[in-house]
Amino acid sequence: MGMSVTISGATERDAEQIFRLQYLCFQSEAALYGNYHIDPLVQSLESVRHELTEDCVIVARLGDEVVGSVHGSVTAEGAAAINKLCVHPRLQGHGVGARLLHAAETALTADHGAKRFRLEAGHRSEGSLRLYRRVGYERVGTAKGHDGVPVIVLEKPAETYAATA
C-alpha cells in the first residue's frame, strides 16, 4: 500500500528540505530563462528559516519527505502575495500544486484576512500559467522581476478560493 501526499503548515524542522526542494524544482525555470539568479536558487537557508517564522508556508509531505511547498504573505490592505509554489518533479502533474495553492489560499483568508490573491509567473512558464488559470486566476498585467525575468501578474478575489481547488 502506497503513502498519500498530505498537506499541512510548515514547521521550522522543514526549512532544510524546503531549501533543497526549491533549488531542485526551480532549475527548470532557470534553464527556461537562462537565468540562474532567480530567487529560489539564490535564497539562503537562513532566509528560508526566516520566512517560516514570518510568512504562511504550506508543505506537501510524502511520509517524512517534503515534496512540495508554497509561500504567502498578506499586506495591511489584505492583498495576499503567493509565491515559490513548487512540487518535486516526480510528483508534478498529480494535483499536488493545486492542493498546495488551495491550502495557502484557505490559510491566508482564514488566518490573515486576505481579500484577494496575487501571484506572478514567468512569461514562458506555460505549466504554471495553465494551473493558475485553471484555479481561477486572471491576468492583470505584466512586470519584470528584480532578477530581470519578465512575469505575468495574475489575481483573483479571495471569495473564489473554495470553489476553485
Image (cartoon, helix red, strand yellow):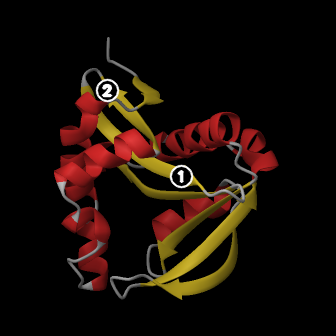
From the viewer's side, name the closer residue of 32 and 60. 60
Residue 12: x %, y % from top left:
28, 32
Residue nearer the viewer, 63 or 110? 110
**In the picture shown, does residue 39 fall above or below 140?**
above
Q: Relative to 13, does residue 161 appear above or below in the rendering? A: below
Q: Secondary structure at mark 1?
A: strand
Residue 83, position as x, y percentages in the image:
47, 59
Query: Marks 1 and 2: in contact by CB < 8 Å?
Result: no
- The quadrant of the picture occupied by the N terminus is top left
Q: What numbered label is drawn on residue 62? A: 2
Residue 164 position in % (x across, y down) = 72, 46
Residue at image point 27% right, 57% down: 25
For disc 1, the marked residue is 73
- Which residue is located at x 53 percent, y 70 percent? 120
Circle 2 packing at 10 Å, graded few (<14), some (14-19), many (20+), is some
Under mark 2, the amino acid is Leu
**From the viewer's perspective, is 124 left or right of 103?**
left
Mark 2 and mark 1 lie on one chain; the one further toward the N terminus is: 2
- Distance (Cα) linking label 2 and label 1: 25 Å
Amino acid marked by disc 1: Ser
